[in-house]
Image: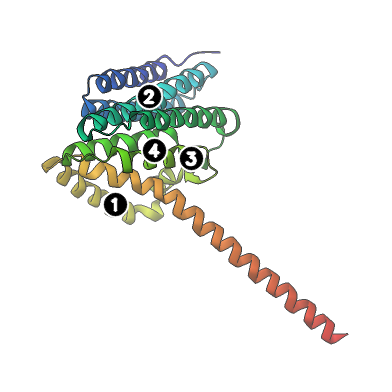
């Protein structure tokens, strides 16, 4: 089977970004470690796009992409989490490093399970993701780290831990996230005005981020995507429950009517 060299090169660069993030975290350069994870996300988006545009998706590319994702979106964020707990221990004097190691291990394991499940059962699915995509989970951790660094906060113990565990569980959950919705939104003429309005808002947000710091914008964007799946899942569940109750009530009414007719 032919190998898409261009897409594989970009995937390899995504792998390099993950390794660079690990090295930066070990040096306690958390800001650079976070930016390397975000760079890996961009590379991960590009390699898939190039493979689809050239219509040369191969098993080699899929395997390489999965291995790169495991490093860039599993191991690299875990190292960032663990080193953040180490610095928290040094600053506060509390021994929270063991908890950091447990949180990091849970995140890596859930990332591996998420990627394995996706490659086996969901790779061909084009409408949605089942479970939070690993790049989104890693990007949320990276943007949170940038946010904390910008405001000089020390919240690893009581915020980063629960956030990381929640993201890990969402990756292996059945919560659904959109996959092709944005592509349809962009290409459909019906949504042209709304898309242009969003572009205008995006330009204003970019201008604000450029004047101050990207950390102020990245974390809300990441959390918005994470919470979208959760809120949408709750809405769908309640809607199905309401429709089910309405159907049962309608069926009961029909039976009562038939009984009266008899």
The colour scheme of the drawn protein is rainbow
Identify the residue under disc 4: 164
Which of 128/229 is in front?
229
Which type of secondary structure does the marked residue at label 3 adopt?
helix
Q: How many marks?
A: 4
Give the Cα distance between marks 4 and 1.
30 Å
Badge nearest the viewer, 1 or 2: 2
- Specify the quadrant of the image occupied by residue 137: top left
Q: Which mark is residue 169?
A: 3
Question: At 46% from the left edge and 51% from the top edge, which residue is drawn?
Answer: 230
Disc on the earlier residue, 1 or 2: 2
Q: Position of residue 212 (x, y in %)?
A: 12, 42
Disc on the earlier residue, 2 or 4: 2
Q: Are marks 2 and 3 in contact (CB under 8 Å)?
A: no
Q: Position of residue 87 (x, y in %)?
A: 24, 29
Give the Cα distance between marks 2 and 4.
16 Å
Q: Which mark is residue 72?
A: 2
Badge nearest the viewer, 4 or 1: 4
Which of 234/160 is in front?
160
Q: Position of residue 228 (x, y in %)?
A: 41, 51
Which type of secondary structure does the marked residue at label 4 adopt?
helix
Identify the residue under disc 1: 198
């Amino acid at each position: 089977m032919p190998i898409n060299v261009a897409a594989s090169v970009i995937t390899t660069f995504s792998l390099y970004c993950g390794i660079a993030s690990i090295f930066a975290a070990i040096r306690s350069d958390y800001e650079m470690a976070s930016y390397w994870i975000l760079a890996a996300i961009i590379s991960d988006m590009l390699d898939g796009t190039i493979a689809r545009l050239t219509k040369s998706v191969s098993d080699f590319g899929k395997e390489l992409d999965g291995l790169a994702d495991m490093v860039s979106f599993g191991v690299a964020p875990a190292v960032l989490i663990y080193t953040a707990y180490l610095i928290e221990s040094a600053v506060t004097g509390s021994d929270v490093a063991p908890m950091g190691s447990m949180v990091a291990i849970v995140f890596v394991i859930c990332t591996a399970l998420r990627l394995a499940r996706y490659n086996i059962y969901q790779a061909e699915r084009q409408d949605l993701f089942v479970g939070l995509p690993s790049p989104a989970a890693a990007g949320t951790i990276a943007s949170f780290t940038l946010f904390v660094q910008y405001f000089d906060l020390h919240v690893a113990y009581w915020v980063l831990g629960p956030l990381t565990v929640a993201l890990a569980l969402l990756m292996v959950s059945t919560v659904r996230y959109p996959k092709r919705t944005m592509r349809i939104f962009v290409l459909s003429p019906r949504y042209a005005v709304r898309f242009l309005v969003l572009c205008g808002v995006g330009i204003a947000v970019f201008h604000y981020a450029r004047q101050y710091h990207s950390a102020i914008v990245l974390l809300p964007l990441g959390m918005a995507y994470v919470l979208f799946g959760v809120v949408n899942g709750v809405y769908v569940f309640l809607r199905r429950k309401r429709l089910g109750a309405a159907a049962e009530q309608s069926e009961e009414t029909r039976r009562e009517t038939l009984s009266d007719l008899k």
